[in-house]
Amino acid sequence: MTMKRKTVTYGLAASAIAIAAAWAALAAALIPPWAAATVLVVAFPVLVLFLGLWWRAPGGEEDIPFIGY
Amino acid sequence: MIEYLVFAAVFGLLLLGVHRKVIARIQARPGPPVWQEILHALKFSFKSTWVPRTASATLYVAVVLIGIGIWSAALFVVLAGESILILFAIYMLHKVVEHGYGLSSGSPYAKFGGVRSVISAASEIPLFVTIAAIYLFTGSLILRDITAYQGVHGPLLLIAPPVAIAMYIVILSKMPYGPFSIVESKELVSGYKTEHFGVWRAGLAVTDGLKTFVLLYAFVAIFIGAVPFWAALVIMTAVLISLSFVCAITPMLSPFDSVTVQGIITGLMLVYVGCLWWVMP
């Protein structure tokens, strides 16, 4: 199972925008700190994984790991 | 606020690098550079990545997201000085995540690591006793109140050393290469992490960095009190180096012995808390 490059780009952009929006809204005192923290708790893991999936080396197909003799 | 997350993850990984370096030097090896764990995280993020055919794809990916998410939440709980009950609930959730890592890939090595993470839940029992003892002294489980109590009465480390030791052992049980690291011991290749490679392993590294930072920062806040941030970082590093010494000179216990030792520690802590409850007004 491989994710399309376009999907990864959208996911990366969505998480980055969510984090930037939470940061800006907190700076403008539009949302309380706990709300900004909640957005980050959800968006930060997505950002980390999608950033890696976005810049990872191409190639690779699913395989069966060693499951014993 | 993302700067806190990035700093905590990077500093936590740096601490894990220091951990490896100290262990290596004690064992008369040169060891890797201290920034090796940061390089590892970056290296894994660049690698070719896919989901193994035997894996449950949803669980396989979700546990990585949940792992980073729960420790991000834990960081905010500690920085905001909120309830340590939430922090330790997150600590318990991590156990479920470890189990999920192990079971999701379909590899027997990872599966054994996941099963061991369940039996090593014994290491969390001293945590409950620790929480009870902290409450007996401070009358609160809110981190802000605990640090305020220490501002008046002095560090809990000096007031209740057995509680600090119990929490220290809980952190030790989460350190790699330690006596209680049965979930990722070498006879299981990398334990529950075995089949999470590439970007997934980079996510795991970020989780480990955040977890290390949060546990050590919480230890400083709970047992030493409010100190300047730079001082907290210095104390965290000192605590980590002491943990590295323990890891370097202690063999990894068998799963049975690991659980037995944790059970004995819990018993001793229960006796201590029982005595406290008896004598305290």
Image (cartoon, rainbow, N blue to C red):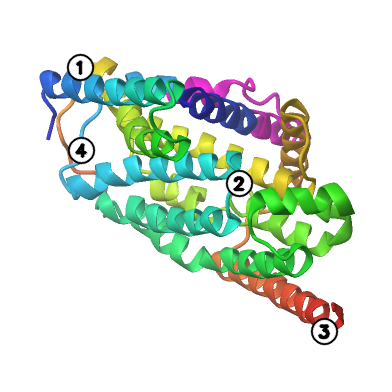
Q: CA distance from mark 2 to mark 1?
A: 33 Å
Residue B175 numbered mark, or none: 2
Q: Quadrant of residue B160?
A: bottom right
On screen, residue B30 versus residue B13, left or right, reads: right
- Indicate which disc, 4 or 3, sits on the residue closer to the N terminus: 4
Which residue is denoted by mark 3 in the rendering?
A: B278
Instruction: Please name the amino acid that badge 2 sits on.
Output: Met
**Discs 2 and 1 carry the same chain letter:** no
Which residue is denoted by mark 4 in the rendering?
A: B51
Instruction: Please name the amino acid that badge 1 sits on.
Output: Pro
Q: How dense is the environment of label 2, judged by Cα within 10 Å: few (below 14), some, or many (20 and up)?
A: many
Q: Quadrant of residue B8?
A: top right
Which residue is denoted by mark 1 in the rendering?
A: A58
Q: Quadrant of residue B256?
A: bottom right
Q: CB of mark 1 within 8 Å of CB of mark 4?
A: no
Chain to which mark 4 belongs: B
Vertical relation: B106 (above or below) B25: below
Instruction: Please name the amino acid that badge 4 sits on.
Output: Val
Residue B59, position as x, y percentages in the image: 24, 49
